[in-house]
Amino acid sequence: MLDSAGFKRQRFADLITDMEVKAKEAYGDDVNTSERSVLGILLRVVAWFLAYLWSNAEDVYNSGYKDTAEGVSLDRLGPYVGIERRGADYAAVQLRVTGTPLKIVPAGWRAATETGVYFETTDEVTIPAGGHVLASARAVSAGLAGNTGAGTITIPANPDPDITAVTNPAAASGGRERETDFELRQRWDLSVASGGASTLDSLRAGLLDTPGVRAAIVAENYTMQPVAGRPAKSIEAYVLGGADADIGQTLLGKKAAGIEPYGSVSVQVLDEGGFAHTMRFSRATEVPIRIRLTLAVNNRYPAGGDGDIISAAIRYIGGEDSDGQLFTGLNMGESVKVSQLIGSVLSIAGVTDVQVQLSRNNGASWTGSNLTLAAQEVAQTSYQWIEVTRP
């Protein structure tokens, strides 16, 4: 039923009870409605289908709300607040192609890893006299599989006698899976002001909605004197992640006219009239968080439990998991709270107790207390920085 408290669906047991009461009203109190009676069987068959319809009705009701909608229903709610689900991204990498000088490596030339992950060049390049050239490439398929390590892309997929070798000096990065419902809801909560402009909240929301941006804050100087290095009547955005050009375009579209953007990064962007503007911002200071977790577990602890523990810690703090997935985690300036980290770890089956040690200076010193960060700092961790031990 639907009332002031919301929608409450009738479950199978509720329907059977109501139908038995109605049957006795119609046929008398002595009518047999047990599970093995003809009438009882008929009532239960009908109740099963009615329960299915009630379940569908509940799903329809829930599809209209951000916290309960799922899948496509959630996608269709996003545009009402100006956000869309982010699709899977392609990993990008620089390939070092070795071969005959003056050989042209066309756009679309492919190389692969031994595990069958293919990359293709995005631009045409020519091998110079030195015999090798760097070519920009991206994964053929979107997703985490494209985040391969350095030196793993070594197989030319298009054999050519003038191309003798290929490798990637640095790891491929940027590949990610399609944004999950949970991630979309998190970004929704942080982007509620994105429909406006010229306010600090709308500017921050716009930055958070910029592709690749994982955290952002905006500071302002509304006085006529320099404050903390910021010129009079200026703003300074601190941003983690994202491309410079995309961030600059967001600043141009969201900041108030006549307000100077200040920061250590400068980028030229065009307005709708084709005029160039210089947008400035600063990169957030990433604070690497190393973690030591000492666990007490029981026989419910899964075989891959250590990996689940590490993933849970990364989801809370933010950073890169072992599969290359990047998680936003804590907001900029937000402290790392030991109690919340413990809660994330205890959510894994079989963990009965946990002791936490944290370090923000590459392991020079450790503490079991909360870590406080400055407004422009953001905590980040990595699967390589988390140590899990079980006595």
Image (spheres, grey):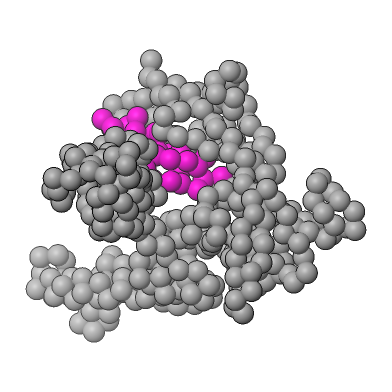
Q: Relative to 116, does residue 23 appear above or below in the rendering?
A: below
Q: Is residue 310 magenta?
A: yes
Q: Quadrant location of residue 367?
A: top right
Q: Is residue 322 magenta?
A: yes
Q: Position of residue 210 (x, y in %)?
A: 53, 61
Q: Relative to 158, does residue 1 appear above or below in the rendering?
A: below
Is 328 on the left or on the right of 86, as rendered? Answer: right
> Is residue 133 visible in this depiction of the protein?
yes
Q: Residue furthest bottom?
A: 26
* Quadrant the N terminus occupies: bottom left
Between residues 371 and 255, which one lies in front from this camera angle?
255
The magenta stretch spans which residues?
302-330
Q: Position of residue 346 (x, y in %)?
A: 44, 34
Image point 28% across, 26% down: which residue? 299
Q: Residue furthest right?
A: 224
Between residues 204 and 94, which one lies in front from this camera angle?
94
Between residues 356 and 140, which one lies in front from this camera angle?
140
Q: Residue furthest top?
A: 391
> Is residue 14 visible in this depiction of the protein?
no
Image point 35% across, 66% down: which residue? 71
Q: Relative to 388, does residue 283 appear above or below in the rendering?
A: below
Q: Position of residue 17 (x, y in %)?
A: 29, 69
Q: Relative to 48, does residue 265 appear above or below in the rendering?
A: above
Is 302 on the left or on the right of 79, as rendered? Answer: left
Between residues 125 and 111, which one lies in front from this camera angle?
125
Image point 37% across, 62% down: which residue? 87
Is 345 on the left or on the right of 219, as rendered? Answer: left
* Quadrant the C terminus occupies: top left
